[in-house]
Image (cartoon, rainbow, N blue to C red):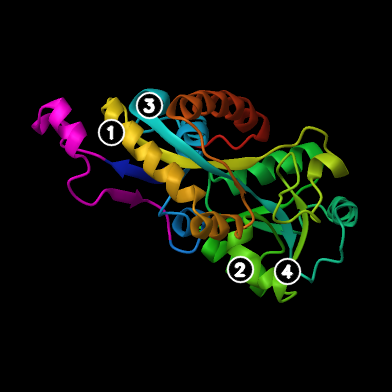
Amino acid sequence: MRRLLVVVAVGLCALAPAPALAQGYPSKTVKIIVGTSPGGSPDVFAPYVCDSAIWAINPHLYAKVPYRPLEDFAGITTIATLPTFLTVHPSVPATTYAEFVAYAKRNPGKLSYASAGNGSIHHITTELFKSLAGISMVHVPYKGMGQGGQALVAGDVQVAFTSYTAIAQFVKAGRVRMLASAEGKRTPALPDIPTIAELGIPGFDMASMLGALVPAGTLREIVAKLNAGIVAAVASHEVYAKIAGFGVGVGTSTPEQFDALMRTEYEKYAKLVKLSGAKLD
C-alpha cells in the first residue's frame, strides 16, 4: 500500500506575485493530508508531522511510486524520532528479550506478528529483526497499528514492533509486554526499556523520523514562516509535553538540516529494505 502520509498543502502559489504571497501567507487554514487509517502514530501526530516512510522507505519497496521523494518534497523541520518496541502478548512465555529470542528459535513459524501493512516501518523492522536474530515468524498485515495493536491485545497475533502510542494503555494495564526498543538508543520517556542493540544485535537502529514537508518549489519565505511557527509550537510546554508523553524523542531542525536528513534516511533504507527481503511489487 502506497502511503502519502502527511503533507502540508500550500498550493495556488502561482496565483499571486511571489513577494505579496509570501508576505500575506497564510491567508487561510493550512491543510494537512493524512493518508493512513485511524489509531496509528501518523494519525495521533497528524497536527504536527509526517513520517519517514514517504521519503525513505516506500521508494525502495515498490517498483513504482507516484512521486520522487527527494525531488518532489522539501523539509520544513523535524519534530521527533518515533521508535518502535518489541512487544508480546502475555501468552508468549517470555519476560525478557533473551527469553523471547530463545523461545522463537525453539518454535519456528509458531509465532505471528502484526504490522501496519506491507511495507510499513513495522513490517521492515520485524523482517530485518527476523533475519539478524535467526528466527521465523508469520507476518499478519493490518490497516494500521490501531488494528494491529488491538489484534496483539486480543491474542490474534503474539508479537508486534509497535510505537508506544498504539499500545500505551495496554502496557500500563499489563495486557502486553514491552521487551526492547528498536531504536539505537534508549528512549528518554521510557529509560527502563533496553535496546535490541544492547541486548544482542549491535548496531540495530530502526525508528521513524517525524517531521513536516511541503511541495518542492514552495517559496523560501513561506518555508521559513512555517518552520518558525512549528518550531515555536513544539517548544511550547503544552505541545512538547504532549509529544514527549507518547514515548518519542522530540527535536526540531532547520529546513536545510531536514533536507540533509531526508537524503541520509533515503540511503539508509535503500540498504535495510534490501537486507530485510521485504521488497514488494
Label 2 or label 1, whichever lies nearer to me, is 1
Q: Which mark is residue 68?
A: 3
| Range of residues picked out in magenta | 10-37
- Counting labels gives 4
CA separation in Å, label 4 and label 3: 39 Å
Residue 242 position (above or below residue 214): below
Q: Which mark is residue 61?
A: none
Considering only order in the chain, which callout, 3 or 4, is on the residue closer to the N terminus?
3
Considering only order in the chain, which callout, 1 or 4, is on the residue closer to the N terminus?
4
Q: Is residue 10 left or right of residue 205?
A: left
Looking at the rendered structure, the kind of residue marked 4 is Val
- Judge by depth and name the residue closer to the eye, 65 or 180: 180
Considering only order in the chain, which callout, 4 or 2, is on the residue closer to the N terminus?
2
Looking at the rendered structure, the kind of residue marked 2 is Ala
Considering only order in the chain, which callout, 3 or 1, is on the residue closer to the N terminus?
3
Labels 4 & 1 near each other (Cβ < 8 A): no
